[in-house]
Image (cartoon, grey):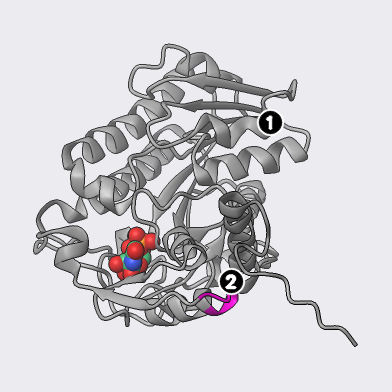
């Protein structure tokens, strides 16, 4: 199979590249490297089945050719991360909506119908307090916090584009609503709580829990997420589909901080930071976020392979090796002699 991945140098994209190359597919990545990193693709560069183009999706001259080559397109290219979304409110809208629109317009004009998987987000549910977020719920955008919801607006627009092009041009689409994704290669630079807490715990610095820490998230390993995407896209039957993708284990940020501290055997204090200090004015956090996975489980035989603890242990080990050159960091190894 020929696979085109826009935004493939990003954290989730690079795991998709790994999955498809391992399955023997040919993979073409386009990424403008605004948040993606060439280093994320280093393990694949030597593969004859891999190709990379550094380009902006809004102007990439090879888009038509690449889309006509592809049997499947994953559209991940987007401005992401809470810090970036707050700092660049106009770019979020322009890039996220226009890139998706250009992709679908190009595919529709080509007459070729690759399967298109569009990365959407649990942000489209807004700040609902429901115990489980299900695909058929009405989506909501708050009017309270200014441009904070621009990412959500852009993803709702991308979903509408995908469903409209599918209806009008028969392009098979899967809209995947990602919940919080974690795993190797994720950076904490643009928000992203888990790499931040891991870094703080490994360094012995205060773990910065924003707000009162009672807000919850549900974290899924990226390697599970990309398998779920592939299974959804590979299913029989061509109707346009919207599906949650993630893990339904819910955890508060206070409990997450404690868990990471414990798994890292760290003495880091836990420090509560007011939202105003963390994000500035004009910010409203989501209090609860847990996916209903019935649709994913009904349509596929997907099962998670990574627990939260598995992923955290791996991230802690990797971070410790990167910082200290050893798995055990600055702690001396204690040998018990019998
Ligand atoms: N968060 C935190 N400390 C940090 C970074 C984030 O407590 O250093 C909180 C953040 O306020 C939110 C949760 O962790 O409640 C998840 O944040 P992230 O940016 O990872 O994802 P999102 O808010 O998009 O779910």
Mark 1, Cα crowd under 10 Å, few <14 / some 14-19 / many 20+, is: some
Q: Is residue 84 visible?
A: yes
Task: Let me know if residue 19 is in the magenta part.
Answer: no
Quadrant of the rendered image containing residue 128? bottom left
Q: Is residue 206 left or right of residue 211?
A: right
Which residue is depicted at the point 48% across and 73% down? 292
- Provide the major secondary structure of the magenta segment: loop
- The disc placed on residue 44 is 1
> Which residue appears farthest toward the bottom when viewing the image?
338
Label 1's element? helix
Please provide the residue range marked out in magenta.
Answer: 262-266
Taking 263 as reference, is 306 above or below it?
A: above
Which residue is depicted at the point 58% across and 76% down? 265
- Considering only order in the chain, which callout, 1 or 2, is on the residue closer to the N terminus? 1
Q: Is residue 13 left or right of residue 147?
A: right
Q: Is residue 287 visible?
A: no
Which residue is depicted at the point 32% across and 46% down? 160
């Amino acid at each position: 199979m020929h696979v085109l991945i826009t935004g493939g140098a990003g954290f989730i994209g690079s795991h998709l590249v790994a999955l498809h190359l391992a399955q023997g597919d040919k993979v073409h990545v386009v990424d403008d490297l605004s948040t993606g990193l060439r280093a994320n693709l280093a393990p694949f560069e030597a593969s004859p089945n891999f190709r990379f183009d550094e380009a902006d999706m809004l102007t990439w001259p090879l888009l038509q050719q690449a889309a006509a080559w592809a049997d499947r397109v994953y559209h991940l290219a987007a401005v992401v991360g809470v810090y970036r979304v707050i700092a660049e409110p106009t770019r979020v809208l322009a890039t996220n909506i226009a890139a998706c629109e250009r992709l679908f317009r190009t595919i529709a004009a080509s007459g070729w119908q690759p399967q298109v998987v569009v990365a959407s987000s649990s942000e489209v549910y807004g700040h609902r307090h429901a115990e489980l977020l299900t695909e058929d719920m009405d989506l909501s955008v708050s009017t309270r916090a200014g441009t904070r919801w621009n990412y959500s607006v852009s993803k709702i627009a991308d979903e509408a584009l995908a469903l409209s092009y599918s209806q009008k041009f028969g392009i098979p689409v899967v809209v995947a609503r990602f919940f919080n994704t974690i795993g190797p290669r994720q950076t904490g630079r643009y928000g992203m709580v888990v790499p931040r807490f891991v870094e703080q715990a490994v360094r012995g610095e205060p773990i910065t829990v924003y707000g009162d820490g009672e807000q919850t998230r549900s974290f899924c390993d990226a390697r599970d997420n990309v398998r779920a995407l592939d299974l959804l896209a590979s299913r029989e039957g061509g109707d346009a589909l919207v599906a949650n993708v993630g893990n339904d284990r819910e955890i508060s940020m206070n409990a997450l901080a404690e868990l990471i501290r414990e798994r890292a055997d760290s003495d880091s204090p836990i420090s509560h930071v007011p939202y105003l200090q963390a994000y500035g004015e004009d910010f409203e956090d989501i209090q609860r976020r847990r996916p209903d996975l019935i649709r994913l489980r009904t349509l596929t035989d997907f099962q998670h392979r990574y627990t939260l603890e598995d992923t955290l242990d791996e991230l802690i080990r990797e971070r410790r090796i990167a910082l200290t050159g050893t798995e055990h960091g600055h702690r001396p190894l204690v040998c018990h002699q019998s």
